[in-house]
Image: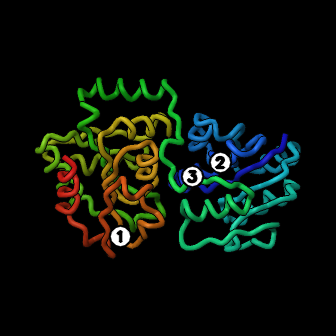
Amino acid sequence: MDKIVFFHMNQLGDLVFSLPVLKAAKQELNAKIYSVVKPSLAPLLTSSALADETMPKDKNAVKFLRKEKIGKAVLFSESPSSLLYAYLSGIKSRIGFKTASLSFLLTKKAKRVGVPSLFNNGELGFAAGLKSIRQDYTGIIKIPKENVENVKKWFGYNNLDASKTIAVSIGASKRRQDKCLEERKWSEVINVLSKKGFNCVLSGAAWEKDVLNNVAKKCRIAPKLFTAEKGILDVAAFLKECGLFAGVDSGAMHLAAAVGTKCVAVFGYTDPSQAGPMPLKNHIVIKKDKISDIDSEDIISKVLQLQ
């Protein structure tokens, strides 16, 4: 049996962009699939049977991969460490993007246009010999029954109807805070939508809890909080149960779209045609050149259009 390893990027959205390539690899190749991936995100791959083994990117990865005698590496990540690890692992076929700073270590290069995206990852997959790669990540993630039950218990404990619940995600990664809308505007959105009968739940990473609490305190009816403290599969289950997602361009937005939840997605300078919730026709995008130009009413009106 052949062996192939994928080197992933560290952000949730970027991992979701890689799902169609891994799905194609599973379907088309008689190969054992390894993924070098951030440990907190690895359960998305293992629960969906997209990776046979996962490992963090650390000094032990090189030793492990060399021992496994991997034949091919596909690098979504352009980081120097990823390219070095693939090279030092003795992997003969190394496919990555020509824009990587150490691209001379690659044996085959794919073109990358703009930011990480489904399209760019698809081009990389084609360069790796895959033939049928979807430009849609919906339905690939499989959520274990245990996590679904955890979330249903949470909704029951908080006496919330999931179908009338909007997951309000106001944050982005620490390096992408320029994608975020003012907290005041989100409290205005929550106030109006709560009055209209929606259950608004502030959703985010565990490290965002203080920010989410600050927004909740500014609301006339304090929303519940759902954070990622119990792991990424509970987050995926929560987003799938919700009737709607409203938030900024983020990994949470892509995860919501991937599990089939309709998104009202807020975009500033980033291009939704590259980085929007896919497929775009299933979602609503609010796009202005400056994120600060988007008002609470823009979001409220789009949500109400869906009633």
Q: Which residue is mark 1?
A: 268
Label 3–label 1 contact, CB within 8 A: no
User: How much space separates mark 2 and mark 1, taking CA atoms?
Assistant: 32 Å
Labels 2, 1: front one: 2
Question: In front here: 160 or 211?
Answer: 160
SS at circle 1: loop
Which residue is depicted at the point 85% across and 39% down?
Answer: 1
Say whether disc 3 or disc 1 marks the residue closer to the N-terminus: 3
Position of residue 194 measured from the top left corner of the image (x, y, whole percent): 16, 44
Residue 294: percent from the left, percent from the top?
25, 68
Residue drawn 72% across the image and 64% down it: 96
Give the amino acid at mark 2: Ala
Residue drawn at (43%, 44%) of the image = 206
Residue annotated with mark 2: 24
Q: Is residue 194 above or below residue 123?
A: above
For numbered disc 3, what is the local secondary structure? helix
| Camera-nearest residue between 214 and 239 | 239
Label annotation for residue 15: 3
Give the camera-side residue of 118 and 254.
118
**Is residue 277 at least partly visible in the picture?**
yes
Q: Mark 3 or mark 2: name the one nearer the start of the chain.
A: 3
Sequence-earlier tag: 2 or 1 = 2
Image-based side of 151 in relation to 25, left or right: left
Percent position of residue 28, x then y = 71, 45
Q: In the rendered view, does 240 fall on the left or right side of 293?
A: right
Badge 1: few (under 14), some or many (20 or more) residues near its Cα, within 10 Å?
Answer: many
**Residue 7, quarter of the rendered image:** bottom right
Q: Amino acid at mark 1?
A: Gly
Q: Residues within 10 Å of mark 2 (few under 14, many from 20)?
A: some
Location of residue 237 (image quadrant): top left
Q: CA distance from mark 3 to mark 1?
A: 22 Å
